[in-house]
Amino acid sequence: MPKVIIDSAKGLHQVAGSGPQVTVNGTVPTIALTNGSGGGAPVATIESQSTDMAGIINVTTQLENTDTLVVTFAEQYESVPVVVVTSLTNYKVTSTVSNFTVTATGNTGTGELHYLAVRSV
């Protein structure tokens, strides 16, 4: 199986080597946090190798009930992507063509939040 790269400038293309590997290159999306519950403000950062398609967010101060974390894509999707988020507790995820939002439904804890956003056709 060939190695492939998905790049915002070149699109999908094959690279040298073999093995089941897909690499996604792109611009890091932005992140914004809001304090919905009146408690302490949540703190999180997005890792520099993250892209619109996949990435890691480091949550250093947990989200509390109704706090939100909004990741705005560097490039808008053509249709609403399916967004999968793992590694935290007590949250729900919604998405639009331009962003996805993690809303706390309780205390989320801290640590790495992993996400994958894929447009289904």
Image: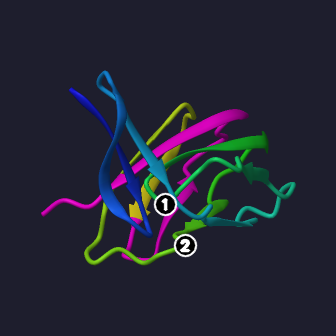
Secondary structure state at the residue bearing disc 2: loop
Count of numbered circles on the image: 2
Q: Residue furthest top?
A: 19
Q: Quadrant of the N terminus?
A: top left
- The quarter holding residue 117 reads bottom left
Query: Where residue 99 appears, x then y in whole percent?
Result: 48, 71
Query: Where residue 90 appears, x then y in whole percent?
Result: 54, 40
Which residue is nearer to you in this view: 32 or 63?
32
Tell whether position 9 is magenta. Answer: no
Of the residues shown, which amino acid type is indicated by label 1?
A: Asp
Of the residues shown, which amino acid type is indicated by label 2?
A: Ala
Q: What numbered label is drawn on residue 34? A: none
- Looking at the image, residue 38 sits to the left or right of residue 67; the answer is right
> Could you tell me if residue 61 is visible in this image?
no
Q: Which residue is mark 1?
A: 52
- The quarter holding residue 8 reads bottom left
Q: Given contact means CB atoms under 8 Å apart, are the residues at marks 1 and 2 in contact?
A: yes
Give the magenta part as a residue range.
Answer: 95-121
> Could you tell me if residue 9 is visible in this image?
yes
Which residue is nearer to you in this view: 41 or 4?
4
Q: Residue furthest front?
A: 16
Q: Which residue is mark 2?
A: 74
**Residue depicted at x 44% and y 70%:** 9
As displayed, is residue 102 above or below residue 115?
Answer: below
Query: Where residue 28 appears, x then y in whole percent?
Result: 62, 61
As displayed, is residue 119 above or below residue 54?
Answer: below
**Residue depicted at x 33% and y 63%:** 11
As displayed, is residue 101 above or below residue 47?
Answer: below
Q: CA distance from mark 1 to mark 2?
A: 6 Å
Q: Earlier in the sequence, mark 1 or mark 2?
A: 1
- Other residues around mark 1 within 10 Å, as few (<14) / some (14–19) / many (≥20): many
Secondary structure state at the residue bearing disc 1: loop
